[in-house]
Amino acid sequence: MFNDKKVVFSGVQPSGNLTIGNYLGAIRNFGAFSEEYHCYYCVVDMHAITVRQVPAELRRRTYETLALYMACGLDPQKNTLFVQSHVPQHAELGWVLDCYTMFGELSRMTQFKDKSAKNADNINAGLFTYPALMAADILLYQTELVPVGQDQKQHLELARDIANRFNQVYGETFVVPDGYIPKEGAKICSLQDPTKKMSKSDPNENAVIRILDSKDDIIKKFKRAVTDSGNEIIHGEGKEGISNLLNIYSCFTGKTIEEAEKEFKGMGYGDFKLAVGETCADYLKPVREEFARLMADKAYLEQIMAQGAEDAYKNARRTMSKVRRKIGFTELKH
Ligand code: ATP
Ligand code: LTN
């Protein structure tokens, strides 16, 4: 079904209910590649366990993330939708790439620093080597393009460095991937601290809008969003809260920031926040409905998982056997 198309790969962790940050920065953009590329969209459950997860919740969220991919418009017949732990080559290549990734490089990763600060009692080795597993995800499929939010840029650069390093030692083995970071929506910020990115594992529920939140909850959270002491609805420095809301509004409506500023000129913060909340909730309504429909049919989701894993496995196996040969592992003769 996919022939020799160029490859797109991206992943989302089933580490919490997805936010409008995940949606605008990543998932919403995935569908645009489906015709031209062979697209792999993965639920990266192995990455999720770098932070402690409750097993039943991890399992449920894995189904939910897959269903959300589809509810956001990804057709499983046109995209390979699959779960990372179903394809063992991710772990296998992850280990190999650990041995081509430097301690110093991993130490500089800002996500590692942030997550270690947040999980001081569980700074495990997986959290540290997370980017090498991410590089394995990407390189296994000979990926050309990786659509992600701004926060993943540093990991992507490392994936490129690892690919180049490996290719230099062993000759052309991996395609060196490029990131695709959208112009709009690449960094949606927390509603409670607009200097930080919105993160699905934020313990402060008021800081995040989840794709599946009810309209009432969405509006309530937008109403509580922190702003600033002024009263003008303009984008700019010192107005991080308002800038973030304008940005979200512009992403959901397709209007430019300037157009949005003009539209809200003279309006009070309260009415502005209500308008952003309503726009966001109405936009997401069909996604919520389609998600509910998909989640009611677990057998169908399992069939998609199986079909995705089979397709991913075939291609992952090809790269992995090349890697094994290049590094000098012996092969069993059958
Ligand atoms: P966690 O809080 O568990 O670290 P997360 O919300 O950062 O999760 P990920 O699963 O790590 O989400 O990211 C999935 C995709 O969503 C990635 O491409 C990431 O760049 C993008 N993304 C995450 N947060 C945002 C955000 N606030 N704005 C734009 N894109 C985002
Ligand atoms: N690290 C990413 C999730 C992720 C990913 C990937 C994204 C894991 N493997 C491969 C793109 C390609 C994150 O934390 N958002």
Image (cartoon, grey):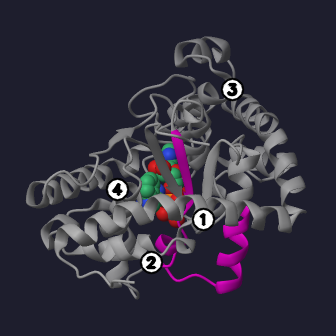
Element assignment for label 3: loop
Circle 3 or circle 1, nearest the eye = 1
Q: Pointer 3 and pointer 2: residues touching (CB < 8 Å)?
A: no
What distance separates the C-alpha of mark 2 from that of mark 4? Answer: 20 Å
Element assignment for label 2: loop
Residue at the limit of the structure toward the left, as seen here: 169
Element assignment for label 1: helix
Q: Position of residue 101 (x, y in %)?
A: 19, 68
In this figure, which residue is indicated by the disc labeled 4? 139
Q: In the rendered image of this protein, does residue 257 appear above or below residue 142?
A: above
Q: Quadrant of residue 131?
A: bottom left
In this figure, which residue is indicated by the disc labeled 3? 268
Ligand 2 is in which quadrant of the figure? Answer: bottom left
Q: Position of residue 237 (x, y in %)?
A: 38, 31
User: Reading the chain from its start, which is encountered first: label 3 or label 2?
Assistant: 2
Circle 2 or circle 4, nearest the eye = 4
10 Å crowding of disc 3: few (<14), some (14-19), many (20+): few
What distance separates the C-alpha of mark 3 from that of mark 1? Answer: 51 Å
Range drawn in magenta:
38-64
Q: Nearer the viewer, residue 195 or 177?
A: 177
Q: Pointer 4 and pointer 3: residues touching (CB < 8 Å)?
A: no
Which label was assigned to residue 309?
Answer: 1
